[in-house]
Amino acid sequence: MTNEKWAPAKDYENTYEVSNMGRVRSLDRLVPTNDRFGNKSSRKVRGKVLNCYLDAAGYKRADLKDGKKRTNQLVHRLVAFAFVENKHSKPHVNHKNGVKTDNSPENLEWCTHQENMAHAYATGLSKRKILGRGDKSIASKLTEKQVRVIKRRIISGESCGLIAKDYPVGDSAIWEIKAGRSWGHVA
């Protein structure tokens, strides 16, 4: 590939490199071996460009091995560490064009979590989740009608564990209702 530049991969400087085109390769290395008589020696293993894969969120990842420990690394972070200046020591990497597989340095920028989320909302990559109150909340597992029944059962003296078995929540959620820390607006 023309104009492809390689730089050491952060935390894997002696074993891997990353390119400005978002590719990752292993370096040539010596691997310890034993011959059939048990004599220790080593053999040279040639480096190669790794096959990266997409994770469930759509980001490219590469499996890197450091000694016996194998980890998977986000390719865009490896590219950013190698090719994008981080003047303000920001912890996150944003894809400017919103394409998660475009890991060119020109498309990456260092940012804070808040800046990353603001970019996602502004570009429509993420829909702002509005948390309502009670069963209007996207996180709610109970309806207000169910909570009224639960509160009556609590008042009648039923145990929280027994009540929880009838609903898609744990007994801790019933305890929170009993204590008034959740669903306090429901009478």
Image (cartoon, helix red, strand yellow):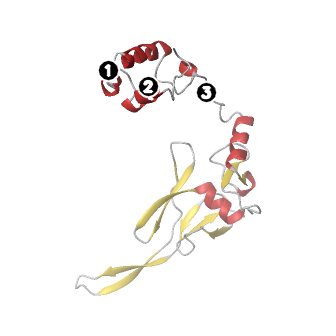
Q: Earlier in the sequence, mark 3 or mark 2?
A: 3
Q: Secondary structure at mark 2?
A: helix
Looking at the picture, how far across and down is residue 94, in whole percent? Answer: 69, 49
Q: Relative to 110, is 147 on the left or the right?
A: left
CA–CA distance in space, label 1 to label 3: 30 Å
Q: Earlier in the sequence, mark 1 or mark 3?
A: 3
CA–CA distance in space, label 2 to label 1: 11 Å
Dot 3 corresponds to which residue?
131
75 vs 12: above or below? above
- Disc 2 marks a residue whose amino acid type is Lys
Q: Is residue 87 visible?
A: yes
- Disc 1 marks a residue whose amino acid type is Glu
Looking at the picture, how far across and down is residue 142, in whole percent? Answer: 46, 20
Query: In terms of image quadrants, where is residue 33?
Result: bottom left
112 vs 83: above or below? above
Q: Residue at x 48, y 73 (%)?
A: 46
The one nearer the camera, 111 or 42, is: 111
Q: Residue at x 30, y 24 (%)?
A: 162
Q: Quadrant of the N terminus?
A: bottom right
Q: Relative to 49, is 122 on the left or the right?
A: right
- Disc 3 marks a residue whose amino acid type is Leu
Looking at the picture, how far across and down is residue 35, in whole percent? Answer: 28, 82
Please report contact status of discs 1 and 3: CB closer than 8 Å, yes or no.
no
Dot 2 corresponds to which residue?
178
The one nearer the camera, 84 or 41, is: 84
Q: Relative to 80, is 187 on the left or the right?
A: left
Q: Secondary structure at mark 3?
A: loop
Q: Residue at x 48, y 77 (%)?
A: 29
Mark sitting on residue 158: 1
